């Protein structure tokens, strides 16, 4: 069994990355060349060698993607971006290698008939990968596809880099921050000019937009937040959309969305706008109901208003929840100290999934903020993997919340290692951020539990991309259960959060779910339409889609798409968050709300949905757990209530 990855100190990190890159690329190329020169005599042998190629590349890309987003040294981040580009370049080269393809395509029927179902699945996926890469196209087309893929890697990195580095600020006098929590104000002292700096990072932007009484402050910060990445990212995105479209058409698809959807649960590009409109229609009634309540409260302060924008929506949501639903978010956050929440998360998920987390205090990491744990199965003491928690903001770090695969797990060979990268307060947390932490940790535990198989291709969160959010969305439910929360949510006096308050929080969270669903469909429509229509004027197209789907009017001179990071990784498929939520609601219907830790159902969910990784289609994983195909019913009932 390979030991967990040992990272170097900052001084040697750049050379370490370069050396590791050279070794990993050489290993992958050597294996591929050997497969072409003297292919194994049996189909299983061929597939095993190819899986070794994939393992070498995954180990490189996982390391590089993580450190490019979290390492404190800019030169190391840049070197890791170079590694990502080199890995993508080799992947493209191999996927377009006609000789290599012939090795797989030339396997005889007798050879393939002898494969077990998982190996046969791997072969089918491999042949599909080659075809989608354009291996059957002429030499000139393959050359152009290679150019496109290399440029797409560069553009995706530039897009992410601009977002990561573009932290905007406003500076205001302290009297304009009335309403802000005391601990937040204490962490934001007045500078020598008598001003307080507020950034667009989430630990600043979210509470300011929620609690600051001064509407001007909220609007100024919201405008700054919505303009991150502008104008630098618009030409980047336009080129990105054009090249993705060209790639898709060169390999026989009408557009990028059709190419992208072929390997997802949804199946076809045309089904994406149908799904968006289905959700938008289902959310119409709940949206109007709650918007009327919100606007009525807004008009108490702004009588002439006929609409409310995102500069005021979070603040007035809080007022409605406090005044009409008896939930004070500033009181709520006093129960969510970060250190207690982190330990509570480990306790809850450990109990649910039958594991424990042993802290590794002497593990070398990229920053002192990072905590490291070995994941051990309670049943037999087996070491399943290692997780890293990097949960606070800093300069040069990824700005959102995500799980990064560091290494894929393979039974008896290599431990699964995953990293949670977030940007939370070091003190008190908004409950929304607690829910986010549970959500993202769901990806992390999925990666580890599904890292016990024999194939790199199916290790970890390797299902269709429009399913991967479902397990994490379902895990959010444990961050809402009063019995669960009372195990770790305590105030400064040690008193657990009252069950009645949690019930009111849940009711308050339900407020606005219709317009939140419509907001998600606005994002999904931007994601889809920008790729299919490739509008000449992205801002005008965004405004038109906002008028069609979103509950909030456009704030002039803002360009949210320039920092809409999902246009990179998720491309045309942002719909997947809502698609996954439909499935998550159905998955959760199998749990007893009075006993969320019931061993039979929790174990069945772990073993039938998470542990198989990508070894089955997602629809089959869900059916194995539920005993039936998934339906829209649970989501529709939740949205309507």
Image: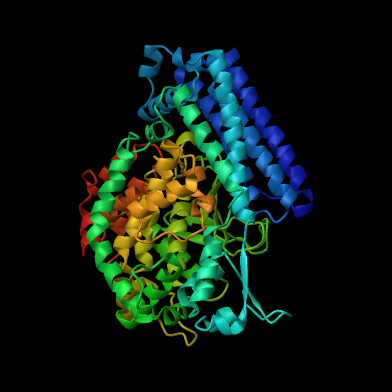
Say which quarter of the image contains residue 140. top right
> Toward which corner of the image does residue 147 lie, by quadrant?
top right
Q: Is residue 261 above or below residue 503?
A: above
Front-lying residue, 271 or 338: 271
Direction from residue 191 to residue 337 in the image, left or right: left
Q: At 54% from the left edge and 72% from the top edge, which residue is drawn? A: 339
Q: Is residue 614 above or below residue 112?
A: below
Name the residue at 37% across, 57% down.
519
Q: Residue at x 44, y 38 (%)?
A: 531
Q: How many marks?
A: 0
Colour mode of the rendering: rainbow
Q: Quadrant of the N terminus?
A: top right
- Quarter occupied by residue 301: bottom left
Examine the rendering and report whether any part of residue 39 can be seen.
no
Question: Is residue 115 depicted above or below 37 in this figure?
Answer: below
The answer to which of 9 and 228 lies nearer the viewer is 228
The C terminus sits in image quarter:
bottom left
- Residue 453 is situated, as x and y percent measured from the top left of the image, at 45, 39
Determine the residue located farthest toward the right in the rendered image: 11
Q: Position of residue 76 (x, y in %)?
A: 72, 48
Residue 514 picture location, percent across and down: 29, 61
Q: Nearer the viewer, residue 239 or 336?
A: 239
Q: Position of residue 350 (x, y in %)?
A: 43, 61
Q: Is residue 405 visible?
A: yes
* Residue 247, placed above or below residue 188: above
Q: Which residue, as the protein is rendered here, is positioned at the far front?
A: 304
């Amino acid at each position: 069994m390979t030991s967990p990855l040992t990272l170097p100190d900052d001084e040697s990190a750049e050379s370490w990355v370069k050396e590791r890159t050279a070794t990993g690329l050489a290993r992958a190329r050597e294996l591929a060349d050997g497969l072409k020169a003297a292919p194994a005599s049996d189909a299983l042998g061929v597939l095993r060698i190819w899986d070794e190629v994939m393992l070498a590349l995954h180990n490189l890309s996982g390391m590089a993607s993580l450190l490019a987003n979290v390492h404190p040294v800019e030169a190391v981040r840049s070197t890791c971006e170079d590694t990502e580009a080199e890995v993508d370049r080799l992947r493209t080269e191999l996927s377009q290698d006609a000789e290599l393809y012939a090795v797989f395509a030339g396997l005889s029927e007798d050879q393939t008939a002898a494969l077990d179902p998982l190996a046969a699945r791997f072969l089918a996926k491999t042949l599909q990968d080659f075809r989608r890469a354009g291996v059957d196209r002429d030499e000139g087309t393959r050359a152009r596809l290679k150019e496109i893929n290399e440029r797409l890697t560069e553009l995706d990195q530039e897009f992410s880099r601009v977002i990561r580095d573009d932290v905007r600020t406003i500076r205001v006098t302290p009297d304009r921050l009335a309403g802000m929590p005391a601990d937040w104000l204490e962490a934001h002292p007045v500078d020598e000019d008598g001003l307080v700096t507020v950034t667009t990072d989430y630990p600043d932007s979210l509470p300011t937009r929620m609690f600051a009484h001064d509407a001007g402050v909220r609007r100024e910060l919201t405008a700054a937040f919505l303009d991150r990445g502008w104008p630098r990212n618009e030409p980047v995105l336009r080129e990105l959309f054009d090249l993705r479209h060209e790639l898709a058409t060169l390999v026989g698809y009408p557009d990028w969305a059709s190419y992208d959807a072929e390997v997802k649960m949804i199946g076809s590009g045309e089904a994406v706008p149908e799904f968006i409109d289905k959700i938008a229609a289902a959310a119409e009634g709940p949206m109007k109901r709650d918007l009327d309540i919100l606007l009525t409260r807004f008009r108490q302060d702004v009588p002439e208003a006929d609409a409310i924008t995102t500069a005021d929506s979070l603040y007035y949501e809080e007022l409605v929840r406090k005044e009409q639903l008896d939930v004070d978010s500033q009181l709520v956050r006093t129960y969510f100290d970060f250190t207690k929440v982190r330990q509570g998360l480990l306790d809850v998920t450990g109990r649910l999934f039958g594991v424990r987390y042993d802290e590794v205090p002497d593990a070398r990491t990229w920053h002192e903020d990072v905590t490291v744990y070995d994941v051990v199965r309670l049943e037999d003491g087996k070491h399943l993997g290692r997780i890293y928690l990097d949960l606070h903001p800093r300069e040069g770090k990824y700005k959102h919340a995500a799980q990064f695969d560091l290494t894929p797990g393979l039974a008896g060979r290599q431990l699964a290692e995953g990293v949670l990268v977030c940007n939370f307060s070091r003190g008190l947390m908004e409950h929304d951020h607690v829910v986010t932490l549970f959500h993202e940790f769901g990806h992390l535990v999925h990666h580890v539990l599904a890292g016990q198989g024999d194939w790199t291709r199916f290790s970890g969160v390797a299902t269709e991309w429009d399913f991967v959010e479902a397990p994490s969305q379902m895990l959010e439910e444990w961050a809402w259960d009063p019995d669960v929360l009372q195990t770790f949510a305590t105030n400064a006096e040690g008193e657990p959060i009252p069950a009645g308050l949690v019930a009111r929080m849940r009711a308050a969270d339900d407020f606005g779910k219709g317009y939140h669903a419509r907001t998600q469909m606005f994002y999904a429509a931007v994601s889809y339409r920008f790729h299919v229509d490739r509008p000449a004027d992205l801002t005008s197209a965004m405004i038109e889609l906002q008028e069609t789907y979103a509950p909030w009017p456009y704030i002039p001179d803002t360009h949210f798409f320039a920092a809409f990071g999902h246009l990179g990784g998720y491309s045309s498929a942002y719909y997947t968050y809502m698609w996954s939520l439909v499935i998550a609601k159905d998955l959760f219907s199998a749990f007893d709300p009075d006993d969320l830790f019931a061993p039979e159902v929790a174990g069945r969910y772990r073993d039938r949905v998470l542990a198989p990784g990508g070894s089955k289609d997602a629809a089959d994983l869900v059916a194995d757990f539920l005993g039936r195909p998934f339906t829209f019913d649970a989501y529709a009932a939740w949205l309507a209530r």
